[in-house]
Amino acid sequence: MAKILVLHGPNLNLLGTREPEIYGSATLDDINHMLKARAEETGLGIDFLQSNHEGVLVDAIQQARGKYDYIIFNAAAFTHYSIALRDAIAAVDVPVIEVHISNVHKREEFRHQSVLAPVALGQICGLGVASYLAALEAIIYRLNH
Ligand code: CA2
């Protein structure tokens, strides 16, 4: 059975409580439940981790080696500057799909750059919580082709 790890970075535990005009009204639990339901429908295993701490996310990526087939990763603000997360992604052979709820390209200039994108399999942004679902659909497609 293929297994997917979903990683959520800093402040995403606040989803659904503030800034709904940017991030929508779904909570992190809502997102995780949606992903779990779709993964179960297709016979995939799926685990979730949210952390506000860069090192915890580095550890999770390192430990994903040999255990998970794909990682769906919203690194939140770390996306824009964490070389530690970039190096961790580059060091493991687990493909990472970078996701963002908002369209980072139409926001502040500092959000236009992702230091993770060059080592990610791909990037999905701007679709709201459907960015996560699109990443999961891409994985399902790739596992079947
Ligand atoms: O659009 C995304 O998914 C982001 O990764 C979200 C990050 C932001 O730093 C990235 O540039 C784009 C911020 C996550 C903070 O989430 C909050 C949720 C509710 C209230 C406040 C922050």
Image: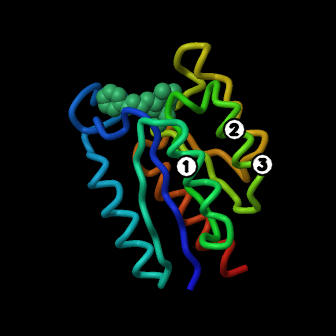
Q: Position of residue 13 (x, y in %)?
A: 31, 40
Query: Could you tell me which residue is drawn at 65 percent across and 40 percent down?
Result: 85
**Quadrant in which residue 105 is drawn:** top right
**Quadrant in which residue 23 is drawn:** top left
Q: Secondary structure at mark 3?
A: helix
Q: Secondary structure at mark 1?
A: strand
* Residue 90: numbered disc: 3
Nearest the camera: 54 or 71? 54
Q: Secondary structure at mark 2?
A: loop
Residue 118 falls left or right of residue 82: right
Q: Is residue 72 above or below residue 17?
A: below
Distance from the alpha carbon under mark 2 to that under mark 1: 10 Å
For badge 1, the amino acid type reads: Phe
Residue 23 falls left or right of residue 53: left
Nearest the camera: 110 or 105? 110
Residue that mark 1 sits on:
73
